[in-house]
Image (spheres, rainbow, N blue to C red):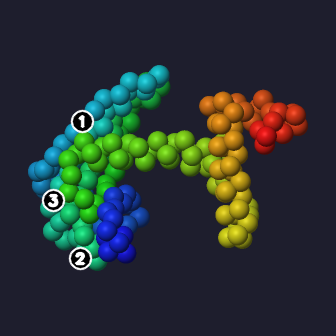
Amino acid sequence: MIVNSGNDYVIAVKANQKSLYQQIRLNTEQSTPISTDTTTERTRDRVTSRTVEVFDNLIGISLEWVGLKTLVKVQRTGTRKGKLYQQTAYYISSLKGQAQVFAQGIRGHWGIENRLHWVKDVVLDEDNSRIRSSDASANLSIIRSITINLLRQHGYSSVTTAKRLIANDLEKLFVLLQ
């Protein structure tokens, strides 16, 4: 549907998609990338190095992936609070592009993940909600998104700090709605 409507996709493949994940891992280990991009970033107590590699070896990948042109491997290594970490993520894409373009897009998506989904999941405790009705959980998710946007619009860069400062102050809460 995505490709037939004239669009493209870049989809993360996780380990719970066993056969696809294993095939991508095998293909990227046995092939030479057609493009590579490496960046290093230092922020606060973190140093992160990201290497993005693009592959065109699609052997063994299901033909059900309409328009599939490339496999993308992202390796993240670094330190957080002095502790070493390493992650590898895989993506499939209908785009045939340079590693730098994929790196920017994937990094941009993580920005959304960190600024919205992580805040909803961790700070606003969305994952622990006991509400399971699809309408109710969807409505509460929308309310959480509105809350995050209102707080950021009023200059709160940290939702946690905003919760502490205004949660029990009705006047400040009503100011958000004006």
Work out whether mark 3 precedes mark 2 in sequence or the reverse, and give the earlier one.
3
* Residue at disc 2, secondary structure: loop
Residue 32 seen: yes
- Residue 56 numbered mark, or none: 3
* Residue at disc 1, secondary structure: strand
Q: Residues within 10 Å of mark 1 (few under 14, many from 20)?
A: some
Report, in whole angstroms, how far the alpha carbon at label 1 lies from the one at label 3: 19 Å
Q: Quadrant of the N terminus?
A: bottom left
- Residue position marked by numbered label 2 in the rendering: 63
Identify which amino acid the numbered label 2 is placed on.
Answer: Leu
Residue 142 position in % (x across, y down): 67, 56
Report, in whole angstroms, how far the alpha carbon at label 1 lies from the one at label 2: 30 Å
* Residue at disc 3, secondary structure: loop
Identify which amino acid the numbered label 3 is placed on.
Answer: Asp
- Residue position marked by numbered label 1 in the rendering: 38
Q: Is residue 56 left or right of residue 92?
A: left
Q: Quadrant of the C terminus?
A: top right
- Residue 83 numbered mark, or none: none
Residue 49 position in % (x across, y down): 31, 33
Where 18 falls versus 39 (above or below)?
A: below
Work out whether mark 1 precedes mark 2 in sequence or the reverse, and give the earlier one.
1
Residue 169 position in % (x across, y down): 87, 33
Q: 47 or 92, which is in the foreground?
A: 92
Work out whether mark 1 precedes mark 3 in sequence or the reverse, and give the earlier one.
1
